Structure formats: C-alpha cells, structure tokens
Image (spheres, helix red, strand yellow):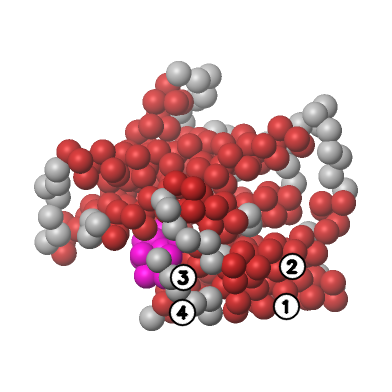
C-alpha cells in the first residue's frame, strides 16, 4: 500500500515540472500559486460534498488548518519563488532535497521525534547522488552576493525549512485523527487567502492567462500535483512518518529527468547514472529504516 502511494507521488510531482514551465509568462508566480491551490481546494470540497463528508469543524481545527496552510501552501512557496529568481534549476533541486534533513532535525527540535540514523545516512547518500546529476550546473554557479546566488540559496533554505514544518504538522494532525481530505481542502484555501493578502500589499498584478496551455497546466497542477499529489503524500506522512516520506523530494527530480529523456531528448551520462543509483540506494536505506524506539 505505502509503496503504491510512494510511486503515485513520484509520478504526480515528477511530471509537474513540465506543467510548471507552461505557467511561466505573463502571470506572476505568486498569482499562479493562488489559482492552483484555490482550484485544488475547490476540487477537494466537491469531492467531500459528493462523498457526504462533513464540513462542520471546531475553531481549533480551523486554526490548525490555517497554520498548516501558512507553512505548507503559502510561506514556503513564496520563499521558493524568491529563490528561483536567482538560482539554476539543478541547484534548486539540490537545496530542496535537504528537506529530509530538515524534517529529521525539526521533528527532533519542535515535535520531540527521535532521530533515526539510517534515514539521515540514506538522505545524505541521496543528496550526494543528486549533486552528481547536477554537478555541471552546480560547478558553473557563481557564488557571490552580487550575483544574487547567496540570496537565492538562503531563500530556498527558508522554503525548505517551512515545508518541513508543514509536513511534520500534518503528521501531528493526522495522529489526532483529523480528516485528511478536509484538512487539505481547508489548508489549501487558507494558504491561498494568505498569499492573496500578501499580493494585495505588494506591487503584484493579479491576473489570469486564458491560453489553452496555461489553463491546461493549471488544471493538471491543481488536480494531479495538488489535490491528488499532496493528498497521497500527506497520507504517506501519516503512515510512515514525515522523515521517510520526505525522501520523495530527493527522488522527484530524477523522475522529471527520466520523463525529459522521452519528451525533451535529455542526454544521460555515466556520471548521471551513478547519481541515480546512489539515489535509489539511499531510498532503499530510508524506506527500510526500522521504527525508532520512543
């Protein structure tokens, strides 16, 4: 069951990289995020309605979902988009791949979760493998304040930190038996509202691109990458823990490159294949790590 969930997330998020490229253009990235999560939230609410799931919850539950929306569907995305303005895609992937490390240590510091050494080791192996795949982009990076790379690096670290807090929080809410689908629906809605508030006080134009490519990619990102992808991923967080589940973010760029092989004629090197093998090896270590004694 968990293996199936894991591969669903890999395919949903690995393929989302292509959809995101069609979102780049006239619409500000922050606005595209709002449209994406508003639509995803609407899809989940419609699902809840036809499934007869309840909509009435206490203010404490809504406060929890507001907090989850802030960390998982708002502030991390805002920080990430600031970071991507300065960084190459390979470096972005590498920084965000440290999500597993952030999740392990934030879980220990803020949620009193024990540190599982095999997961730490597996994550380091996987990150090293990913760094090999993107070694050319990383070596070509000019590390300086003038180029903005250091600033972008710090923004991406903040995005990764906030994302790890959101995933750990989701695990805690599931442990308290809060319903996952409604939790995601309300959290995405609240995250969107918070970004709208940010846009309102910023010099950002709130617009919509009505072209076929933009709308098709928006629907794909909202339905597959968000409503389904986050739903399955956070279910996985509840089942196996946020530390194990977060390894998906190390593996996802590899899936994107595999798809790029067929659609964009991406050329693999032997060094890149070694990187993939290391990522797979790290993945095996993480997923087979034994539960920690608590």
Q: Is residue 259 left or right of residue 194?
A: right
**Relative vertical location of residue 50 with respect to residue 287 in this rendering, above or below:** above
The tag earlier along the polypeptide, 3 or 2, is 2
The tag earlier along the polypeptide, 1 or 2, is 2
Report the span colored magenta. 229-242
Residue 120 visible in this rendered orientation of the protein? yes
Q: Which quarter of the picture shows residue 232?
A: bottom left
Q: CA distance from mark 1 to mark 2?
A: 7 Å
Residue 183 at x, y = what percent? Answer: 28, 52
Q: Secondary structure at mark 1?
A: helix
Q: Are marks 1 and 2 in contact (CB under 8 Å)?
A: yes
User: Which numbered dot is residue 3?
Assistant: 4
From the image, state whether disc 3 or disc 2 is nearer to you: 3
Q: Nearer the viewer, residue 25 or 64?
A: 64
Residue carrying label 3: 292
User: Which numbered dot is residue 114?
Assistant: none
Say few, some or many: other residues with alpha carbon within 10 Å of mark 3 (under 14 / 14 to 19 / 20 or more). Answer: few
Residue carrying label 2: 129
Say few, some or many: other residues with alpha carbon within 10 Å of mark 4 (under 14 / 14 to 19 / 20 or more). Answer: few
Q: Secondary structure at mark 4?
A: helix
Residue carrying label 1: 277
Q: CA distance from mark 3 to mark 4?
A: 20 Å
Q: Residue at x 14, y 59 (%)?
A: 53
Say few, some or many: other residues with alpha carbon within 10 Å of mark 1 (under 14 / 14 to 19 / 20 or more). Answer: some
Q: Nearer the viewer, residue 21 or 199?
A: 199
* Quadrant where the N terminus is found in the figure: bottom left
Magenta span: predominant SS is helix
The tag earlier along the polypeptide, 3 or 4, is 4
From the image, state whether disc 1 or disc 3 is nearer to you: 3
Q: Residue at x 82, y 27 (%)?
A: 146
Q: Nearer the viewer, residue 251 or 22?
A: 251
């Amino acid at each position: 069951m968990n293996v199936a969930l894991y591969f669903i997330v890999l395919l949903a998020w690995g393929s989302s990289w292509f959809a995101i490229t069609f979102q780049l253009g006239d619409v500000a990235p922050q606005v595209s995020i709002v449209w994406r999560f508003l639509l995803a939230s609407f899809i989940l609410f419609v699902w809840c309605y036809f499934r007869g799931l309840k909509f009435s919850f206490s203010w404490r539950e809504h406060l929890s979902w507001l907090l989850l929306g802030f960390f998982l569907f708002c502030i991390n995305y805002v920080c990430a988009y600031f970071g991507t303005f300065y960084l190459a895609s390979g470096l972005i992937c590498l920084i965000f791949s440290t999500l597993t490390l952030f999740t392990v240590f934030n879980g220990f510091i803020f949620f009193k979760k024990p540190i599982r050494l095999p997961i730490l080791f597996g994550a380091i192996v996987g990150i090293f493998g990913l760094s090999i795949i993107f070694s050319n982009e990383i070596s070509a990076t000019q590390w300086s304040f003038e180029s903005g790379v250091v600033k972008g690096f710090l923004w991406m670290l903040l995005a990764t930190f906030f994302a790890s807090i959101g995933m750990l929080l989701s695990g805690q809410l599931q442990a308290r038996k809060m319903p996952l689908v409604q939790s995601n629906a309300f959290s995405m809605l609240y995250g969107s509202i918070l970004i709208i508030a940010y846009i309102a006080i910023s010099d950002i134009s709130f617009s919509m691109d009505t072209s076929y490519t933009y709308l098709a990619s928006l629907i794909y990102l909202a339905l597959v990458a968000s409503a389904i992808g986050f739903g399955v991923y956070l279910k996985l967080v509840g089942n196996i823990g946020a530390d194990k589940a977060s390894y998906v973010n190390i593996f996802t760029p590899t899936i994107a490159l595999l798809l790029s092989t067929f659609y964009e004629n991406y050329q693999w090197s032997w060094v890149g294949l070694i990187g993939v093998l290391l990522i797979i090896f790290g993945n095996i270590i993480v997923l087979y790590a034994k539960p920690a004694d608590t």
